[in-house]
Image: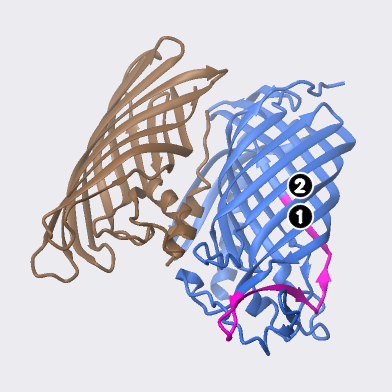
Chain colours: A brown, B blue
Amino acid sequence: MINKKLLIALLAFLSVGMYAQVGFNCQFVPGLQVGSVKVKTDNTRLKDYKFGAALPIFMIDRIKTKWYTNLEMNALYYATTQVNNVNAGKVKIAKTEGAYIAGRLGYGFGKGDAMRVGPNINLGWGASNLDSSKRTLNVPSYYTIGGGVFFYQKIGSRIRAMAKVGYEKYKNKSANDNVKGLSGSGIYMEGTVAYNVYQKFGLAVMPAFYSKKFSYNYGGEAVSTNAKVRSLFLRIGFVKFF
Amino acid sequence: MKKIFYSAIILMAVSFGAGLKAQSVTYRVQKDDPYDVKNLTVAVDPLFFDLNGENGYAFGWGARANWLMGKRLDINFDMRTGFGTQGYNKSDKFNNTRNYFYTEGSLALTLSHKTRSNNVRVILSQSSYSSGGYTYTNTKSITVPAESRHIVALRGGMYQMTNSINMTKVFDDSLLMFTNKSTGTEFSMQNNSDTIAFIPNTMGRNGNGDLYGGYASTAIFAGFNFKTIRQLIIDVDGYGLRSNQVYSDFYVDCIFSPVIALKNYKAVAKNGKEYEYDLKYEGGKRAIGWRAGWYFRKPKDQGFSYRWEFGQRPGFKSYNPEKKSINFRNWYTMLTFGLYIPLKVKPIATED
């Protein structure tokens, strides 16, 4: 079942624009990623499972002058690209992991154009396959709130790099038909290395690690299920230098 | 109704009030050059939506390229393919449906190329607030004279597309004929004298029980392209850098499609044998169509592009033609969103 709200949300946020000294704009629109996601549960019906990372992603990660902004729709974009496959029953497991829509806003301190460091706040709506779902747009979803710190460094004339760490809380009373009363927390670590190839343009590589812990009621069971989701990704996208 | 009326009066009063308080601003032109553009753009469209009467909807990704060669030629390439096509049954062993796919190439020859000075609006600031269920936006703007290039071009090209088609809804009469390619038997979908097992679509959102098939169309098109290029950047005291930058294409095309074909249909008949059927709609085809669209990007900066297109594709005539002169099943509207990379490639136009 295609979730109308998700498609409308995707359409609405397609209108997010971009304007252009310090910093770069990593545009994974679309971008590619490789990696894996491990889900460990203490539920005997679900057990443990592992799947490869979803290949297409949709994310903008940028720092300009003082401000750091991030818009992520990786889970939604992957889920949307699989509609034909889901309808045909060709998806063995939904690789939906990340955000349907999430944003970060941060302010960087630092003089000159070489370095910035600062805090950021995070807000969003994410998804993780906590019930071994095969329907990419119907995996458990949850609201996220959190914060982190980021560090930006210019290295020579061709390389710019960034590191981000943070902590987030997750919650949703009704995550999907199977998963209720979801709560949890997690950490993330992301690094970005951008290399200038031509004029102001280049390639960005982002290794990322996410560790999330969840507690929820699965399928109306009396005992709650605890799950750990660990993801390791390597993302590649297009970058514009400011 | 009263609410709307009072809101309009309040808005007018606020506008007059703002007008009375209007203050002069000082600005310096940093750039006013519609010729300093990058004339080749290569874009990836991560998402498009095509809403149409033939199968409902399709969405997917695409790629585009546009090269404005000097002042005379404009070359376009466009491709889209669906990753969510209503009615497309990827698991159908008979492969009776088709995924959305579109590819187009076109060339435009400049008829008129003029540079004019117009007063254009530059927004200084915008703020919104909500009250009584309504959202009000307060915009401060000034008008500034700017140079704009206006290009009128005659364009023509060719496209090829495939899509799934809802045969139950589009051909809701007895004129959709099936011809058994082995036995030569001919029958309409409604009387089904071969008693073949039609495969209703039962998947996901498509689980409406309708019968879907596939079609292909090859068409040529010709029309006009109206291009506007403007690049004004000003430094406004108290506001900083503000701009009005446009690289837009508005186009209108007439489409002629000599080839509109339904995909052959495979099914199992009551006798247990598998047959392939040639499909033909006796109600006829409508080979002429039209479309109009807008495409926006920035003249020089890398960024995101947007397009909106609508029209009537060549297709099949409406059923019950004495009551319907236009087949709304051929109408469509489409939105695309893309990430483009602008490049400067010779030859490029310079100001005379």
Q: Quadrant of the C terminus of chain B?
A: top right
Look at the picture and state if B312 lies above or below B173: above
Q: Tell me residue B292's x, y (percent).
A: 76, 55
Outermost residue toward the right in this view: B111
In the shown orientation, is residue A239 left or right of residue B314?
left
Which residue occupies the foreground of this view, A97 or B270? B270
* SS label for mark 2: strand
Identify the chain of the residue marked 2, using the numbered disc in the image.
B
Q: Could you tell me which residue is drawn at 51 percent across and 56 percent down?
A: B136
Residue picked out by circle 1? B292
Percent across and percent down for residue B33 are: 73, 24
Which residue is identified by label 2? B250
In this rendering, position of residue A151 left or right of residue B13: left
- Tell me whether circle 1 and circle 2 mark residues in contact (CB < 8 Å): yes
Give the magenta part as a residue range: B267-293
Report crowding for label 2: few under 14, some 14 to 19, many 20 or more residues within 10 A (C-alpha).
Answer: some
Residue B110 % position (x, y): 88, 36
Secondary structure mostly taken by the magenta-highlighted segment of the chain:
strand
